[in-house]
Image (cartoon, rainbow, N blue to C red):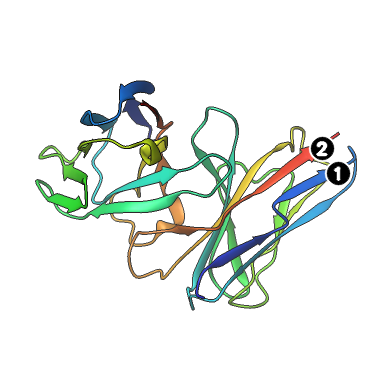
Amino acid sequence: DGGITQSPKYLFRKEGQNVTLSCEQNLNHDAMYWYRQDPGQGLRLIYYSQIVNDFQKGDIAEGYSVSREKKESFPLTVTSAQKNPTAFYLCASGSGLNTEAFFGQGTRLTVV
Amino acid sequence: GQQLNQSPQSMFIQEGEDVSMNCTSSSIFNTWLWYKQDPGEGPVLLIALYKAGELTSNGRLTAQFGITRKDSFLNISASIPSDVGIYFCAGPPRYTVTASKLTFGTGTRLQVTL
């Protein structure tokens, strides 16, 4: 089936540890995005990539890093520099030809 | 930066009732997107609007792109329990042709009682 897969669904980490969230898509989309969602809030853009080997900071990039070595994959690393990492993280992709974004099922990260 | 205000923030309705919600912006949008998010899941695209005045339906859902291009409306007719969730409006800044800078509203939480 075509779609966007995020893994794992739930992730627990100790404070001070880096953690990498996976996002894979088989929709042949050029663009991929990472959003963060806090309770009762909308979605805020962390990083986005419009083409392989290129990515741009979104509105809240501090404490996060990404890579885009393959078209299908856009992993997000939450570093120890992120002050409040506990959140729901959503990956999305789009064809780049229009404005629609399609989302994965999300990863809930809890840092204890 | 741009902000999208959604109202109401939350609503409780009875099964079978019609629902209306809206989204307003401080600036002009060329595209309006409506998403629904179930608890613990990613948002799912419901309707996309590309032209001022456009009225588009998807089953029991109808959305309109406001004439001023600063607002959009979503209506759900004859609500059912599975309509429960959070509805988000979203749009890119003017002159943007990708979703790279989608701005999301804060959402309208819908709860349906039997």
Picture coordinates of residue A77, whole percent (x, y): 75, 55
Task: Check chain identity for marks 1 and 2: say if they share one.
Answer: yes
Residue at image coords 73%, 36% = A86
Q: Is residue A39 left or right of residue B47?
A: right
Question: Does A98 sit above or below residue A78?
Answer: below
* Chain of the residue on which disc 1 is drawn: A
Q: Amino acid at mark 2?
A: Val
Secondary element at tag 1? strand
At mark 2, the secondary structure is strand
Q: In the depicted view, which residue is nearer to us: A51 or A76?
A: A76
Side (left or right) of A37 relative to B89 = right
Residue drawn 42% across the image and 52% down it: B44
- Who's the residue at 56% across and 49% down the image? A58
Q: Which mark is residue B47?
A: none
- Picture layout, residue A83 above or below residue B93: above
In this rendering, position of residue B70 left or right of residue A18: left
3D distance between C-alphas at marks 1 and 2: 5 Å
Question: Residue tagged by mark 1?
Answer: A13
> Where does label 2 land, which residue?
A111
Could you say which quadrant of the image residue B13 lies in?
Answer: top left
Marks 1/2 in contact by CB < 8 Å: the verdict is yes
N-term-proximal mark, 1 vs 2: 1
